[in-house]
Image (tube, rainbow, N blue to C red):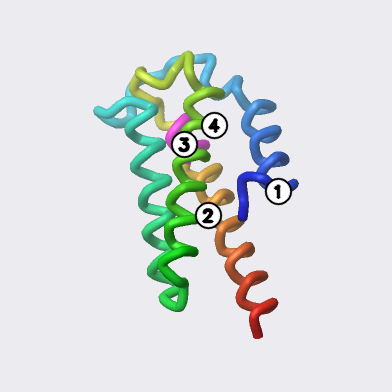
Amino acid sequence: MVTNGEGYNQLIQYLTENLSVFEQAGPAHVEISTGEYTTDKVAQSVMAVCQQHPQLSSESRFCIIRESDSVVNDLQEVLSSVWNTHPSLQQCEFLDEFISLIKNLFDSAIYTINAANH
């Protein structure tokens, strides 16, 4: 649906090009780890996608959840050096933006599927 597409590959490239955001530790912005922050934000995005598209079948919802797990795994791999540290404000802002872009990919994929079915 999303993780095997060109848009996702470009986003991962964008992430790797901006790893410098994670090289400099600043004051912790939240009291949870980068991993927990990322996982929570991806989960919130998945819930928003499902709420915004109530017509999704159970199978489609399961596919979105499975792909969101892949997204978190990919992020964990790329951000492994900071996964267990507390993110700074700049890191949180970057993650928020990045995860919003991932959500947009899911939304676009759903719209494409819906258009093909009508």
Q: Amino acid at mark 1?
A: Gly
Q: Nearer the viewer, mark 4 or mark 2?
A: 4
Residue 60 appears in the figure = yes
Q: Quadrant of the C terminus?
A: bottom right
Q: Say what secondary structure mark 3 lies in.
A: helix
Q: Main secondary structure of the magenta part?
A: helix
Q: Decide: few, some or many residues near mark 1? Use Cα within 10 Å; few <14, some 14-19, many ≥20.
A: few
Residue 90 appears in the figure = no
Query: Relative to 13, is 22 on the left or the right?
Result: left
Q: Amino acid at mark 4?
A: Asp
Question: Which quadrant of the view contains residue 29?
Answer: top left
Q: Which residue is mark 1?
A: 5
Res. 72 mark: 3
Instruction: Confirm or deny contact between disc 4 and disc 1 (CB under 8 A).
Output: no
Q: Residue at x 74, y 46 (%)?
A: 6
Which residues are the magenta region? Answer: 91-95
Spatial CA distance of label 1 from label 2 is 14 Å
Instruction: Confirm or deny contact between disc 3 and disc 4 (CB under 8 A).
Output: yes
Q: Which residue is mark 4?
A: 74
Question: Which quadrant of the view contains residue 49?
Answer: bottom left
Spatial CA distance of label 4 from label 2 is 15 Å
Q: Which residue is mark 2?
A: 103
Locate residue 47, reporting x and y percent.
Answer: 37, 59
Q: Determine the residue located farthest toward the bottom in the rendered image.
A: 118
Q: Amino acid at mark 3?
A: Val
Q: Say what secondary structure mark 4 lies in.
A: helix
